[in-house]
Image (tube, rainbow, N blue to C red):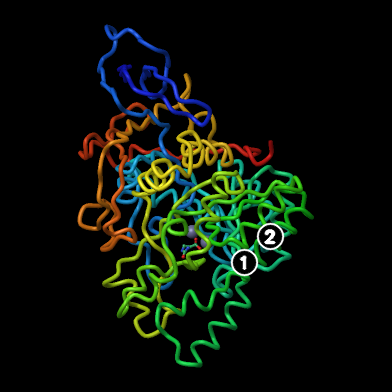
Amino acid sequence: MPTTLIRNGTVVTAERSVAADILVDGEKIRDIAPSLPTEAAGRVIDATGMLLLPGGIDAHTHLDMPFGGTTSSDDFETGTRAAAFGGTTTLIDFAIQAKGTRMRDALDTWWKKADGRAVIDYGLHMIVTDLGECGLDDMDSMVADGVASFKLFMAYPGVLMVDDATIFQALSRTAKNGALICMHAENGGVIDVIVRRALAEGKTTPIHHALTRPVTAEAEAVHRAICLAEMAGAPVYIVHLSSEEALNQVREARDRGVPAFAETCPQYLLLSIEELARPGFEGAKYVFTPPLREKRHSPKLWDGLKNDHLQVVSTDHCPFCFEDQKSLGKDDFTKIPNGGPGVENRLQLLYHHGVNLGRLSLNRFVELVATTPAKLFGLYPRKGTLAPGSDADIVVWDPRADHVISAKTHHMRVDYSMFEGFTVKGNAKLVMSRGDVIVEDGVYHGRPGRGQYLKRAARGGAWA
Ligand code: URP
Ligand code: ZN
Ligand code: ZN
C-alpha cells in the first residue's frame, strides 16, 4: 500500500493543536508524531505553516432531491466534488420515503443516485413520511443497513409533515433501536394558515416567504419536539435552527439534562431577512426554511456555538438554479423551490467568521464541522478526528489563503452564490479522502464512484 507523509504541519483536533507529522498508510492514518522518518514514505507533502484538520463532515445535504416541483441541481457527483473543494470529505444526505411505500425502496433509490457518482464518502438519513403498517419495523431494518438517523418534518403539510402521534411513535422506536431523530421544527399548520392569508391579500413576492414563517412557529415546534422526545425517552437533534427563541428552547432543555442537540447553518450566522427584499425577484435566491431572520438572531447563534448550546454546523445544501428553477415562483412565493447552496463554503465561512474573528477557538471549529457530527451520527472515530486507525480524511488548511466566494469560480452546479463577494482568509490547500489526494491547489484529482456508502452505527454520541 502506498504511504504518504505529511510533514511540519500543526495537527488540529477537537481536543488539541500540536506540531506533528502524519503518516498515511493506504486508506488509514498509521501514525501521528513529531519528526517521523521520511525515507520510507512514497510521497512527502510539506505542510509548513499549514493546519492539518480532519476532513469536514456535512451532516445535512440534499443532492438530486425532488422537491417543490423540480430537483436540486447538484447530483452526487457535482455536489460531492464541490464539497471536496471546500474541505468536506463526508456528507450525510437524505433519502425520502414516498408516502405509502417502504423505506427500503427509498434507500435503494438513493443508493442508485449515489452509486458511481459520489467522490467522497457519504451516509444517508431516512426522511419518514408515513409509518403505515410496517414503518416502525422498517426503521429497525434501516438501522441494520447503517441508516442510524431519521428526519421528521413538523412543516410542509400535505407533503412531508407528520403529526405528533407519528413523531412520538418514531421517537419511541429510536429509544429502543438507538437511532437519532432529526427534526425539522416549524409549526406547519399555523404557517399554512398565515401563508393562505398572505396570498389572499395579494402578497406574492419572496419576502413574504420569510414574513409568513414567524420565529414563534419555530420555537414552539422545537419546544414540542423536545417534549415529545422527553416523553419517549429518546434524544432529539434539531436541524437548521435559525433563531434566538428556538435556541433558548434547546438551551433550557440541555440545562435540565435532556439530550437535545441542534445544528445551525452558515446562512443563519451570516445573512439576514433583508436578502429576501432584494430588488425584483433576487430575493428568491434566499428562499429556504426556516427563513432568514432579523439581524438580532445571529450573535445569539454564534454564542450558542461557542457555549455548546448548538453542537454542529451543517449547510442544508439544497441548490436550485435562479434562472430556471427559482423562477417557478415568480408570481407566487409558495412555488419557489425552498433551498440554497452552500456545501463548498462551510469551512471557509466558519473558519473566517468564527476563528479569525475570535468567535470560536480552532479546536471548537473542528468540533463543530467534523468531530461532533461524526460522534452524533455514528461515524466516530473512523471519521471526524485525526488519530492512528482513523480514515485518512485530511485537509491541509492554509490559514493565510485569501479567497473571494463567487458563483463564477465555485464548483457547485448552481448559477448563484448566497455569499457572492464574501472574502475569507483560510482555505483548503489539499484534501485527502481515505488516503487519495482528491483536490490540490485548486486542481481536482478525484473520481466519481470512489466515494463509499458509510454504514453508520446506532447509539452514537447522543446516547453517551
Ligand atoms: O428550505 C430548505 N431547507 N430546503 C431543504 C429541505 C429542508 O427542509 O431541509
Ligand atoms: Zn428541513
Ligand atoms: Zn434540509
In the image, 220 versus 104, the foreground residue is 220
Residue 414 pos. (x, y %):
28, 60
- Considering the numbered disc 2 on the image, is that residue within a helix, a strand or a loop? helix
- Name the residue type under label 1: Met
- Name the residue type under label 2: Ala
* Circles 2, 1 touching at the beta carbon (< 8 Å): yes
Residue drawn at x 59%, y 41% as measured from the top left: 376
Q: Which residue is mark 2?
A: 225
Whether residue 124 sits left or right of residue 88 in the image: it is: right
In the image, 354 versus 108, the foreground residue is 354
Q: Is residue 265 above or below residue 451?
A: below
Q: Quadrant of residue 401?
A: top left
Residue drawn at x 34%, y 81% as measured from the top left: 330
Q: Which residue is mark 1?
A: 154
Residue drawn at x 51%, y 92% as measured from the top left: 200
Q: Is residue 215 above or below residue 380?
A: below
Residue found at the far front of this picture: 358
